């Protein structure tokens, strides 16, 4: 099994590499530099994080399965990453090596590996398709806010992007929650993805 590591923290990446190299089932572990350079290394898996997941994969890594290392992201961020990226597995930083290897084996057999901490993020918005029918009741600005939420943006980031105050963002979110009868930002993620797709099409 060959592993490529692409993490925002080179210290964490090096520590993970050292641990993986001690495992008998791992034949090679390589660190990707910020440019994504490793020559002639066709990995089975790439371990990435929120800082590096959106970086373009080098051509020789396009077949590698993606395992996201979760540093304790919010449910909103996890849901957005799962929906907007091709992720084959999610592991927390405190996962022991035995479980990580078990995850690699399960993923290599075509399964998706999501630890119990992150399943909750999926469950919270699994039943939210019904909300897309109610999207017509949202104003244009509220739709923009929903799209920003689906991208994992904070209220401050939304305010900056839409050139409105944070208080106005909060007012829009309260209005959206009432109109769609939801109580969590994660429930808006699928609708935000759909609204984004509708803008492009």
Image (spheres, rainbow, N blue to C red):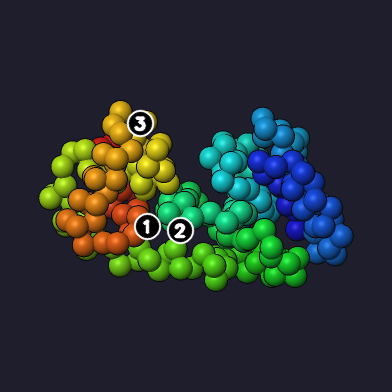
The mark nearer the N terminus, 2 or 3, is 2
| Residue closest to the far front | 167
State left or right for residue 79 relative to residue 187: right
Cα separation, mark 1 vs mark 3, equals 20 Å
How many labels were placed on the picture? 3
Q: Which mark is residue 186?
A: 1
Name the residue at 72% across, 34% down: 33
| Residue closest to the far left | 137
Cα separation, mark 2 vs mark 1, equals 7 Å
Q: From the viewer's perspective, is residue 150 above or below residue 122?
A: above
Q: Which residue is mark 3?
A: 161
Question: Could you tell me if the residues under marks 2 and 1 are in contact, i.e. CB atoms within 8 Å?
Answer: yes
Identify the image quadrant of residue 184: bottom left
For label 3, the SS is helix
Q: Which residue is mark 2?
A: 75
For label 1, the SS is helix
The mark nearer the N terminus, 2 or 1, is 2
Q: Position of residue 82 (x, y in %)?
A: 47, 55
Q: Position of residue 86 (x, y in %)?
A: 50, 51
């Amino acid at each position: 099994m060959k592993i490529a590591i692409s993490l925002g923290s080179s210290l964490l990446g090096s520590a993970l590499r050292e641990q993986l190299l001690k495992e008998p089932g791992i034949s090679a572990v390589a660190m990707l530099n910020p440019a994504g350079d490793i020559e002639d290394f066709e990995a089975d898996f790439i371990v990435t994080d929120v800082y590096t997941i959106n970086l373009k994969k080098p051509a020789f890594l396009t077949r590698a399965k993606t395992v996201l290392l979760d540093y304790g992201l919010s449910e909103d961020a996890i849901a957005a990453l799962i929906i907007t990226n091709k992720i084959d597995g999610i592991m927390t930083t405190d996962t022991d090596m035995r479980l990580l290897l078990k995850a690699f084996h399960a993923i290599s057999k075509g399964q998706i590996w999501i630890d119990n901490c992150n399943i909750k993020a999926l469950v919270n918005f699994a039943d939210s398709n019904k909300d897309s029918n109610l999207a017509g009741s949202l104003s244009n600005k509220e739709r923009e806010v929903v799209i920003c939420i689906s991208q994992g943006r904070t209220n401050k980031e939304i305010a900056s992007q839409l050139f409105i105050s944070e208080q106005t963002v909060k007012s829009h979110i309260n209005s959206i929650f009432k109109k769609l009868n939801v109580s969590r930002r994660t429930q808006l993620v699928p609708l935000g993805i759909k609204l984004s797709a509708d803008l492009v099409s």
